[in-house]
Structure formats: structure tokens, C-alpha cells
Image: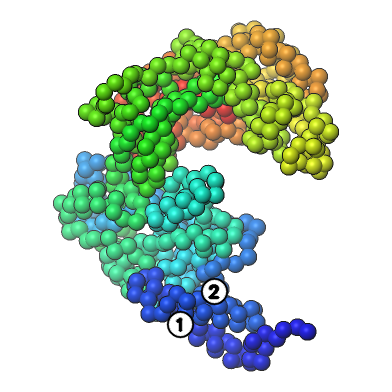
Amino acid sequence: MTELSPFEEMSETHAAEEISRLSRELEAHSRLYYVENRPTITDREFDALMARLGALEDAFPHLRRPDSPSQRVGGEPVEGFEQVAHDPPMLSLDNSYDEGELQEWVERSRRLVPDAELSYVAELKVDGVSISLLYEQGALSRAVTRGNGEVGDDVTANVRTLRRLPLRLDGVPERLLLRGEIYMPRTVFQQLNRRREEEGEALYANPRNTTAGTIRLLDSREVARRKLEVAIFQSVTDLGVSTHGEILETLASWGLPVMETWRRCPHVEALRDYIHEWQDERRRLDYETDGVVIKVDGLGLHERMGRTGKAPRWAIAYKFEAEQAETEVLGVTVQVGRTGALTPVAELAPVLLAGTTVKRATLHNYEDLARKDVRVGDFVRVEKGGDIIPKVVSVNLDRRPGGTTPFAIPECCPECGEAVVQFEGEVAVRCVNPACPAIVAQSVEHFVSRNAMDIEGLGEKTVAQLLAAGLIEDYTSLYELTLGELEVLEGWGKKSALNVLAELEKSQQRTLAHLLFAVGIRFVGVGVAKKLAERFRDLDRLMEADRETLEDTPEIGPKVADSLIRFFADAHNRDRLSKLRSHGVTVTQPEPASAVSSDGPFVAKTVVLTGTLSMARGEAKKLLEGAGAKVTGSVSSKTDFVVAGESAGSKLTKAQGLGVKILSEQEMLDMLEEG
Ligand SMILES: [Zn+2]
């Protein structure tokens, strides 16, 4: 006997009325609870109303409206997101980093509209993810991420789960296009990370990245659980008012979430006061803010002032100085990378920095460590800019306890105990033991990675399992694995063993370019590997090439040539290559379809070189271009990386201000190599 639905007897008209009544009631309570902070019913009563609405909609599915409050809990997972064009495009803002730059902007603005009396609106810039929201006939109909400013992802189902965002607005234009910022409150972020820590999961780096990841989750029910917030700061639709301040007031009056921290500033001094006030006060907020957005208040002036490229001239962002915190160094540990480079890492007493608990900070290398003279027991200042790994800025010598000693460069590798070496002209201290477990594990991981031999089913954990079981010694022995060996491994079985064997077989068909990258020759990234493969087409021909021939290759300089000669001269490496060949791995390159590097950390990135590098500028440029980068002369917000050598000057300062990722020469080389 089937159970009757409690609404079986209800007429459709009655159901429609009931659904509409419940929806209105729930939205009103949501607003009281989430926006006005004065709930008039208990959570339990709220849940009961919501449950009734959900049950009614289940009984009459065609009556479920897209703006129903029940959609706040999320719906069925989706396959992917539809791409939607922004009209008009979502602009970005120019940045200023000190009051001098702000003053320059003010003066530029005055020159643009000399007849106007300029006044401003200052708003805190919420550090989240920009979103475009469309209300049609009062109902939230579409939410699209910023994407590249021209085209973004339709994440409407996810955005409907944001509690503070009304799904329906009364008395608004028929078509209302808004811009806002979705963010994760610090407290929510911390709770989320606490839960992940308990579950033994990797912690999220910061609220902004977590927001970006959350809003693009395919399962909106999970988005609903993450408790994201949204702040609206702009209306693209003309609201019939004459100032930006009035726009904010109008939006707030409609029940839209507008940050209350904005302020009208009649002159520049008021702007400065606002910045000074929030420079420190912002730490008390439950959300991250990295600056202040300043807009000319008069909307009529916006049109007259126009824009430069992608940024309006009537607005600018003022960036706060990077946050620093002081904490104690509990110890210094050492990580051994794939190339054998030893990286010292400071283990810190946990400290809250820019909304995240920091427990470790990189010390880059021993030279850096020695220069800063970081000792165990010291109190150090740590800094974090953007999502860069926290770094130790300096030691507070006033708090140095007695009896500390400078940290010595280890003589032995912490992983294998072999003596370490430092090559001439290199900063890195390296373990050169080819059998070092840390190096072997990472070189196998590199070999199977996507840009290398692309062997699916062999992740970090699987590689560790194979090594621990003694089934492989290095990447060459992957091709000697048998079904019998694999299927008996814990967590495996015949099916997964066969899958991996099939993947291994498939990988034998990869090209010489993949192979050259996969075997991990220093300075041979994806781009250089391609150039070499295209020029030589055959492994033997490459191995026999002399220095002159190598350097004659487009984009190959003496540094890469040296490295190739050294690699191919090594008996160990020659042995591995001949094993791979005997296992049927392709050692030739087919005729090229295209010669453009398509993957790797520098592909399509804009890089600026500054300061004195140990290699010639031209060579560094060649290396980067070989890896798909565009090397330019000046730093701007479009710069992805700045490689800073000795005595780097204003470009470095500018890059730091812009939050551009700074690389040392060594880091650049490591990235080129790691691909
Ligand atoms: Zn070692």
C-alpha cells in the first residue's frame, strides 16, 4: 500500500496560494534574521515552515518557482556552468598604494573635469569574488561570476543559497543589474578549517580562495552549508539618482545587503581620515578587506571622465599595507624537493595573520636564512600578501632569548643522510643521491604528472605505496609492474591494476617532448622540452649533440646546454633512458602541428625581470619565453610574476605594492624545471 501524500487531497489552486503565502512569510523571516538581525520566530518554527513549503513543492513540482526560499538549501548537482557574457563588461579598478598615488589620482581627476567640485564615496573593498546579479520582474534570475570580465560562469543556483540575498525584490526596475562581492566571513572560514582539521583534510589557505572555490562547486547543497555572504556595491541599471551614495542608499532601502561602512567624503582630507581609521580598525571586521574603493560621487561626472582600457577613471582602489604578525620560531625543518634542493621551513607558534592561522613560513633557502639570521626561539615578523605562502620578514632582535645559535647549513640530507653539495654559482644546497627516497618519490610523481607522461591513476599516495612495497625503484621500473604485483596491493584489485597497466601502455606513445620533460632535466621545462624535441626529433640525435649545436637551438642558452650535457653524461641517467627505450617508450617526435608551449606555470603569463641576475637577462628571457611566458619591461597589475635579482629597485617595490608574485632567480629556475 502506498502512503498518501499529506497534500493528496489539496487542489492545485489551493496549493499555489499556500506556496505563495509560505514563500512570502519565509522571505520576511529570513530578512528579519539575516539582514536586520531581529528574528521574531525560533529556528525550529522557521525550519517547520520551510519543511512544509518543501513538501508542498514536492507534491506539486511544477509550482516550484526558481525564486522559492526552498532553493536556499541548494538543488541537484550540475554537470558544469554555462558561460554568460557580461554586458557591459565587469571592469577592474586601478590601484594606489600610498597617499602620494592617491593624491595623483585626485589631481588627475580634477584636471579631467576642472569645472566640477569633486566629492567622493569611500567603501571598504571586501576581499572576495566579484559577482553580477540580475533581477527580472523583481526575481533574482541570474548570477554570473566575473570570469575574465567579459565572460563568466552562471552560478545562479549557488548564489540562491546566500541567505542575506533577497530572491525577490519589490518596487524595483523591471530589469535590475547589480554588481557585488561574495565573501566568506572569517568566523565561518575558521569553523570550516577546524572541521577539516578534525577530519584530517588539508586546510584552506584563506577565505577568498575558499569563496572562489565554493561558488564554483557543482553541488549547491554544499554551497548552502558553507554560509557565504554577499555585499552589493553597484547598480549598472540607472536608478534615476544623481550620486553613487544615493545608489547605495536605494539598494539598502530595497533590502539588499550593502556594507554599512561606506561614507561620503566631501574632500580629500575626509578620504584620508577614512583610510587611516580603517587601516587598523578593519581587523575587527568579520570579513577580510585589503583596501578602500574610492569613487567620484557624482554620476554625471562618471561619463565625462570615462575609462582607460579596462578601468574607470572615476574610481580607484587604495590598498592597505600587507598585514604582518609577530610570532615565535619553534623549529626549523627541511624539505627536500625533486631536484634535491633543501628548503628550510620555519615552524611557528600559531598566529592569526590576515584571517588565517599561520603555523609555517618558508625561509626560501639557507642564504636567506643566514641573512635574516633566524634562530629557533626567535620572535619573527611574518607577512602574507595575496595568497602567497607566508614568509619571514625579519627577526625582532629585542626579543631574542639568550643561548640561541645561528642555524647551520645541514651537512647531510635529512631524508637519506648523504652529504649535501652546493654547486658553484647556486644558492640551493642539494642532496645529489639519486637513491634519496624524497627525490625518487618526487621524480616518479613528476614523471607520471599531466604535462609529463600523463599516467592517470598514479597519484602521490599510489606512488608512495609502490615505493614502500618495493615494487619500483624509480620511474623506469613503472613499466616492469605486473598484474600479479598490483592486484594484491591493499585497496587495489584486478580492475584498478588493469587500468593502471593500460595507462602505462598508453604513456609509451607520448612524444619525445613529453619524455624530455618527464625525466626531469634541470632547466628543461615544458617549453624547452618542446623546442628540443622539435629541433632534434630523436633522442639519440639530441644526446649526441655538442654544445654548439645545442646552443644553436632557438631559445636554448648556455645554461640549458650545460644542463643537458651534464645530464646525458651521467651514466645513471643514460641507463634510465635506455631502460625506458627498451620498455617501448617513444623517443621520437612527430612533425609539429604547432610550436606553441601549451602548459606549465609560465604559459601565457606576463613576467618582468629586474635587478642583477646571475645569468644574462637575455638568457633568462629566452628560458621564460621557451616556457610560454611573455617578458615585458614594466610592472603593472597585469604582471603575473616579477623575477627579482640583486639590488632590484623600483620595479620590485611596485610589484610588492601591487601584490604581484615575486620570484627569486632560483625560484624561477625551479619553476621552469618543475614545469
Ligand atoms: Zn637525500
**Quadrant of the rendering where the N terminus is positioned:** bottom right
**Quadrant of the rendering where the C terminus is positioned:** top right
Question: Does residue 193 appear left or right of residue 522 in this picture?
Answer: left
Residue nearest the observer in this picture, 666 or 42: 42
Residue 446 occupies which quadrant of the picture? top right
Marks 1/2: CA distance? 12 Å
Residue 255 occupies which quadrant of the picture? bottom left
Q: Residue at x 62, y 10 (%)?
A: 565
Dot 1 or dot 2, earlier in sequence: 1
| Residue 496 visible (yes or no) | yes
Question: Is residue 641 positioned above or below 534 on the image?
Answer: below
Farthest front residue in view: 403
Mark 2 residue crowding within 10 angstroms, few (<14) / some (14–19) / many (20+):
many
Question: Does residue 341 appear left or right of residue 504 in this picture?
Answer: left
Residue 54 occupies which quadrant of the picture? bottom right
Question: Is residue 629 positioned above or below 304 on the image?
Answer: above
Q: Residue at x 32, y 36 (%)?
A: 327
Residue nearest the observer in this picture, 419 or 402: 402
Dots 1, 2 in contact, CB < 8 A:
no
In the image, what residue type sits under mark 2?
Ser
Question: Is residue 425 positioned above or below 368 on the image?
Answer: above
In the image, what residue type sits under mark 1?
Glu
Q: Which mark is residue 70?
A: 2
Secondary element under disc 2, as helix, strand or loop, is helix
Residue highlighted by disc 1: 25
Mark 1 residue crowding within 10 angstroms, few (<14) / some (14–19) / many (20+):
some
Q: Which mark is residue 587?
A: none
